[in-house]
Amino acid sequence: MAQSDSVLLDYLRHANPAIDRSHCRGGTNTRDGSLSKYGSLRSPKDVREWDDFSVSSLDAICNGILGQGLRRQYQFQPYPVLAEFPFREIHEEDSFKSLLIGWTWQIVSAALAAVQDEGLKHPSGEVYMVRGGQAEFPAQTTHQEKAAHEEKAANQEKAAHQEKARLEPDWAGARRRNGEKPLTILPGETKISTKWTSAQVPPIMKAGVLDRDIYRPIGQIYRYCIFANARYGYLITDEELVVVRIDLDSCNDKPATVVRYKSIPWRNHSDAGAQDPELMTVNLALWILHFAAAWDSQITTDEGILYELRQRGRPPTPMSASARTRGTTTPARSRTGSRRRTEELNSSFRSETSGIRNGLSGALLETGGSQSSATPSRRNRKRGSEGEDEDESTGRRRKVGRPPKKQP
């Protein structure tokens, strides 16, 4: 097929195929394992909308390559022509994945390749949109798993293998490594709108409810992000793309997380040459998210890179370099104290997540929690009879929801 020249921004804003959802049925979302073994990170402090998700706000993080790339013209193959069946007629999650493979994956991958082939990429190399099984989370090597399981009982080995099997997202933003399987830096998950939409989630969701049905998809992508120490993730349905960002809360002495999300409707599109530089579409948002994950891949406090960027002033819009403004700088003493506090919290978080990854094949399966020297020790509790918890440090049982009595 003959290639045609297109401005990248227009290419990524093309209308998505119309979907026949009449065959989809409702139901509950699949349980994806307990978050209890994640210790203090088992649930975010709160979940709220990602208000500043935009091309301009993320362009500064990506060293300006978003604005540069979106203004340029590239040669692309014609858009895929997809028949109603088996692509646009959706029955369940798996049939929707066929559409994503035939449409979204093709377009986002072509757009990533076009920009990165011209040198607009992270210094460590290209980022790719792949299926989840084509990449792996950190510290997930075969010899480590085998050594960790040799001394475990058969039921523990089975539980560990099941845990590992559940830790494979449908999609991944991946970075290649020499001689190793590519590394997941952006987990993604597929859902069906008859089972879940972001409209069901309250504007501000308190902690401790991720096991409820309407929150399970967010809990699932949160779990992937924590395990991979990935700052960004996404949920994609036949009605919307939900982009997710995980921040550390700098107001706590021990790591606590805040989940931010933004919905981009599947129907969003624009004609070529549209003037609105911030109109977001599914393919454009996924393209941006892959670059953001490459440049800002690890979970940190909001006082990290984003804090420093905000002190320098508002970043430019992608379509106009003249929009760049110059902000005031933060006093050196303030910056030094902020960076020191940020690094302490980020170090504590890295210790927590490292303990989580290692513990899945070791002590974590036995205790249901993790401890590290970088964080305060916590009492491990296990469920006793109905309505009671058992404190392992004393062996005494107490009513759920009431704090334990102080020991003399």
Image: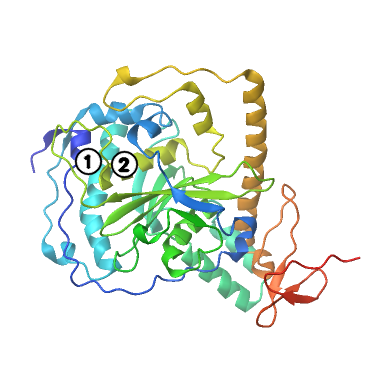
Query: Answer yes or no: do the residues labelled 1 and 2 have beta carbons within 8 Å?
Result: yes
Q: Secondary structure at mark 2?
A: helix
Image quadrant in which you'd find residue 102: bottom left
Q: Residue at x 16, y 54 (%)?
A: 17
- Residue furthest out toward the left: 2
**Image vertical order of residue 284 relative to residue 404, above or below:** above
User: Mark number for residue 40?
Assistant: none
Where residue 86 appears, as percent x and y from the top left, is 16, 66
Q: Amino acid at mark 1?
A: Leu
Residue nearer the viewer, 408 or 160 = 408
- The residue that label 2 is drawn on is 287
- Of the two numbered discs 1 and 2 on the same chain, state the one appearing first in sequence: 1
| Image x and y of residue 195, in percent | 33, 68
Q: Residue at x 29, y 26 (%)?
A: 68
> Of the residues shown, which amino acid type is indicated by label 2?
Trp
Secondary structure type for disc 1: helix
Residue placed under numbered mark 1 in the picture: 12
Q: Determine crowd level at label 1: few under 14, some 14-19, many 20+ residues with C-alpha closer than 10 A.
A: many
Residue located farthest toward the bottom when viewing the structure as drawn: 385
Note whether 169 is above or below 120 in the view shown. below
Alpha-carbon span between mark 1 and mark 2 = 8 Å
**Residue 182 position (above or below residue 313):** below
| Lateral position of residue 15 relative to residue 136, left or right | left
Local crowd at mark 2 within 10 Å, few (<14), some, or many (≥20)? Answer: many
